[in-house]
Image (cartoon, rainbow, N blue to C red):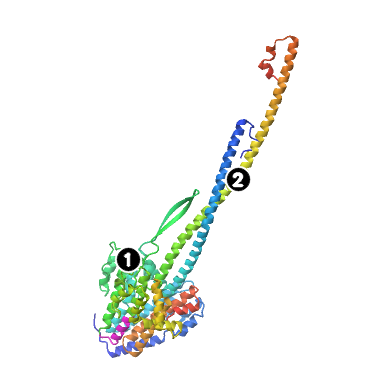
C-alpha cells in the first residue's frame, strides 16, 4: 500500500501514482462488471440448482420406497443377486465450462439408464420389482450427477463472487482512496515546493538586483556581480 | 435314475405328513399380531418359534442386523425343502426335485456370476440357498472350482447341464449370463411339465396348474419387456408350454390400441384371475372384467410394469386355486407342491413384515404385500 508520508513528492512519482490510479480505476470497473456477471450467472443457475435438488430428493425418496418394496418381496438376497448381475459399470466423464474465468464442472454420464437386456439380470429369474428398483436407482444416479454439477457450479461461483467482491471492495475503499490521497498530498507538496521556489527565486532576484545596484554605485563592472556562482550562494 | 415303486401308501404317507406340517404354518391372524410388534419383538417372536429356532439361534440376528434373520429364514426354507425331498419316494421325488431346481438355478447362476466377477468365496457362499437338488457340499465344491469351465464341468450330471454349455471362461458377450439363465428357466418349466405327465398321481392336474402359472409369468414378463423397451425380442423370454401360445404373446406385444388389447386379453384365461384378484384387493365384488382390462391397458399404454400389489393379489388367487386342487386330490402330488408353495410364501411373508418395519412402511401397506 502506498503511504502518503513515505512518497517523495516528485513529479515522476506523481505521474506514477496517476498512472496507478487510472489502472486501478480500470481494474475496479472490470471487476465490478465481472461481479455483476457472476451474480447474473449465479442467479440464473440458482433456479436450476433448486430444481435439481428437489428432483434429487424426490428420486431418493422414490428409490428408497422401491428398495423397501423390493427387499420386502424378494429379500436382500434377491436384490443383491440382481445387483451383482450388472456387467458394465456406468461411465462418468468430467468436462469443464469456463464462465468469467471460473472453471465449472460439466458431467456426462453414459450407461446409467439401460434397457432390460443391458442390465445383465435374467428376465425369468427376477420379478418386476427388480425392474422398478433398478429404474428408480438409475434415475437417482442421474439426479445425483445433475445435482452435483449444479451444486459444484454454485459453490465455485459463490467462492469467485466472494473473492471478486473482496477485490472490488479493497479497490473501492482502500486502494483507490489511498492512491487519490497520495496524489493529493504530492500535488499539495508540489504546490508548496513551487511556491517556495518561486519565493526563493524572487528573493534571489531581489538580492542580485540590490547587489548590482550597490556595485554600480561603487563603479564595479556588472559581469562579476551577476555570475552564476555568486547568485547560487544565496542571501 | 433308479425307479422306486410309488405305492398309494407312499402318497398317503407323504401327503398326510405334509398336511400336518401345513397346519403348523402361520395362520393369517398371526401376521396381524406380528405387525403390532416392534422390530426387536418381531425378531424374538420368529426366533421363539420351534420351527425357526435352530436357524435363528445359529445366526444370532438382531433388530439392527436383519440380513442375518433373512439368511436364517432362507436357511430354514432350504432345510425344510430338503426334508421334503428326502421324504418323497420315486417319481414323487423326481417331481419334487424338478420343482426345486429353481433354487439350483439361482445357486448355480450366483456361483457363476460370483466367480466371473471375482467375488470372495465367503460372499458367494453366504448368498446361496441350498433348497434344491444340489446340496451345500456340492455347492461348496462348485465354489471351490478353479474357473467357470470347471464349474460347468462339475455340473455334467445336472439335468439342466445342456443349457449351461455356452458358459465358458473365454470372452462371453454382454448379457450372456442373462440369456443362459433365461434358457435354464425355460428348460426348468419344460422339464417340470414333462415329469408331471410321467404317470404321477394328479400329474395332469398339476400340469394344468403349471400351464396356468406359466401364462401368468409370461403375461407379467410381457409387461416388463414393454416397459424395458425390449419388445422386439420376446421369444427368448417367453416360457413355452403354457395355455397361451408364444405366437399369441408376440401378437399382443405389437398391440397399440385399446380395443385390440382388450379383445386379445379377453381371449386369454388371465382376465378372470385378474378380476378375482382385483375384487379381493379392493374388497369390492362389483369389479368387472372391463375395469380390469382398463387397468391393464392403462399400464400397457404407459409402458409400465404391472402393479406389485396386483401381482401379490394374483399370487393369492393362484395359491387358492392350488389349495382347491390339493383338497380335491388329497393323495396326489398337489398337496406336496401346495405345501412347498405355502412354506415359501410364509418365509416371504415374514421377510416382508420384518423388512417393511425396518424401512418404516406403514402396517396397512405391508399388509397388502403379504400373501395371506
Residue B119: x and y, percent?
36, 64
Residue A21: x and y, percent?
60, 39
The question of residue B200 being in magenta is answered with yes
CB under 8 Å between callouts 2 and 1?
A: no
For label 1, the crowd category at 10 Å Cα-Cα, with few meaning under 14, some 14 to 19 and many 20 or more, is some
Residue A170 tag number: 2
Q: Quadrant of the C terminus of chain A?
A: top right
Q: Quadrant of the N terminus of chain A?
A: top right
Q: CA distance from mark 2 to mark 1?
A: 62 Å
- The residue under the point 67% across, 32% down is A189
Q: Say which quarter of the image contains residue A10.
A: top right
Q: Say which quarter of the image contains residue B117.
A: bottom left
Q: Secondary structure at mark 1?
A: loop
Mark 2 or mark 1, whichever is nearer to me = 2
Residue B367 tag number: none
Q: Is residue B102 left or right of residue B308?
A: left
- The residue under the point 39% across, 77% down is B296
Residue B357: x and y, percent?
49, 75
Per the picture, the main secondary structure of the magenta-coloured stretch is helix
Both on one chain, marks 2 and 1? no
* Front residue of this view, candidates A89 and A156: A156
The residue range painted magenta reads B199-212
For label 2, the crowd category at 10 Å Cα-Cα, with few meaning under 14, some 14 to 19 and many 20 or more, is some
Q: Is residue B252 visible?
A: yes
Residue A20: x and y, percent?
58, 38
Q: Which residue in the structure is indicated by mark 1? A: B175
Label 1 lies in what chain?
A: B
Amino acid at each position: 500500500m502506498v503511504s502518503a508520508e513515505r512518497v517523495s513528492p516528485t513529479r515522476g512519482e506523481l505521474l506514477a501514482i496517476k498512472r496507478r490510479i487510472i489502472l486501478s480505476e480500470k481494474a475496479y470497473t472490470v471487476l465490478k462488471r465481472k461481479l455483476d456477471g457472476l451474480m447474473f450467472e449465479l442467479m440464473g443457475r440458482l433456479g436450476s440448482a433448486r430444481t435439481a435438488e428437489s428432483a434429487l430428493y424426490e428420486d431418493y425418496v422414490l428409490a428408497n420406497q422401491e428398495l423397501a418394496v423390493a427387499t420386502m418381496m424378494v429379500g436382500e438376497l434377491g436384490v443383491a443377486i440382481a445387483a451383482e448381475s450388472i456387467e458394465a459399470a456406468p461411465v462418468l466423464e468430467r468436462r469443464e465450462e469456463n464462465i468469467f474465468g471460473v472453471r465449472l464442472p460439466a458431467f456426462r454420464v453414459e450407461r446409467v439408464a439401460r434397457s432390460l437386456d443391458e442390465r445383465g439380470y435374467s428376465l425369468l429369474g427376477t420379478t418386476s420389482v427388480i425392474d422398478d428398483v433398478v429404474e428408480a436407482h438409475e434415475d437417482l444416479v442421474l439426479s445425483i450427477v445433475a445435482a452435483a454439477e449444479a451444486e459444484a457450479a454454485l459453490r465455485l461461483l459463490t467462492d469467485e463472487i466472494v473473492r471478486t467482491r473482496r477485490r472490488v471492495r479493497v479497490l473501492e475503499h482502500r486502494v483507490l482512496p489511498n492512491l487519490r490521497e497520495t496524489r493529493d498530498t504530492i500535488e499539495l507538496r508540489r504546490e508548496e515546493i513551487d511556491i517556495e521556489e518561486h519565493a526563493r527565486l524572487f528573493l534571489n532576484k531581489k538580492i542580485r538586483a540590490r547587489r548590482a545596484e550597490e556595485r554600480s554605485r561603487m563603479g564595479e563592472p556588472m559581469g562579476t556581480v551577476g555570475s552564476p556562482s555568486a547568485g547560487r550562494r544565496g542571501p | 435314475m433308479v425307479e422306486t415303486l410309488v405305492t398309494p401308501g407312499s402318497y398317503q404317507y407323504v401327503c398326510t405328513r405334509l398336511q400336518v406340517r401345513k397346519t403348523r404354518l402361520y395362520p393369517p391372524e398371526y401376521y396381524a399380531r406380528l405387525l403390532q410388534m416392534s422390530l426387536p419383538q418381531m425378531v424374538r417372536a420368529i426366533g421363539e418359534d420351534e420351527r425357526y429356532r435352530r436357524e435363528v439361534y445359529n445366526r444370532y440376528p438382531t433388530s439392527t442386523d436383519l440380513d442375518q434373520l433373512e439368511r436364517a429364514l432362507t436357511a430354514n426354507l432350504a432345510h425344510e425343502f430338503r426334508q421334503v425331498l428326502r421324504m418323497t419316494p420315486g417319481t414323487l421325488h423326481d417331481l419334487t426335485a424338478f420343482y426345486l431346481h429353481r433354487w439350483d438355478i439361482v445357486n448355480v447362476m450366483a456361483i457363476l456370476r460370483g466367480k466371473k466377477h471375482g467375488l470372495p468365496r465367503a460372499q458367494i457362499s453366504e448368498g446361496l440357498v441350498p433348497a434344491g437338488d444340489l446340496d451345500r457340499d456340492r455347492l461348496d465344491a462348485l465354489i471351490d472350482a478353479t474357473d467357470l469351465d470347471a464349474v460347468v464341468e462339475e455340473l455334467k450330471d445336472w439335468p439342466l447341464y445342456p443349457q449351461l454349455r455356452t458358459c465358458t471362461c473365454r470372452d462371453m458377450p454382454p448379457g450372456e449370463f442373462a440369456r443362459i439363465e433365461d434358457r435354464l428357466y425355460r428348460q426348468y418349466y419344460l422339464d417340470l411339465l414333462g415329469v408331471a405327465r410321467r404317470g404321477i398321481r394328479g400329474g395332469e392336474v398339476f400340469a394344468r396348474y403349471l400351464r396356468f402359472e406359466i401364462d401368468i409369468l409370461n403375461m407379467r414378463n410381457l409387461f416388463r419387456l414393454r416397459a424395458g423397451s425390449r419388445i422386439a425380442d420376446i421369444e427368448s423370454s417367453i416360457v413355452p408350454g403354457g395355455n397361451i401360445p408364444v405366437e399369441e404373446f408376440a401378437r399382443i406385444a405389437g398391440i397399440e390400441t385399446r380395443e385390440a388389447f382388450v379383445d386379445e386379453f379377453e381371449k386369454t384365461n388371465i382376465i378372470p384371475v385378474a378380476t378375482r384378484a382385483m375384487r379381493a384387493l379392493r374388497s369390492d365384488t362389483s369389479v368387472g372384467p372391463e375395469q380390469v382390462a382398463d387397468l391393464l391397458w392403462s399400464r400397457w399404454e404407459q409402458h409400465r410394469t404391472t402393479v406389485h400389489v396386483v401381482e401379490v393379489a394374483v399370487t393369492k388367487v393362484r395359491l387358492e386355486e392350488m389349495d382347491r386342487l390339493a383338497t380335491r386330490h388329497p393323495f396326489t402330488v398337489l398337496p406336496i407342491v401346495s405345501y412347498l408353495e405355502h412354506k415359501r410364501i410364509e418365509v416371504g411373508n415374514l421377510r416382508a413384515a420384518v423388512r417393511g418395519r425396518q424401512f418404516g412402511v406403514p402396517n396397512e401397506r405391508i399388509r397388502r404385500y403379504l400373501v395371506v
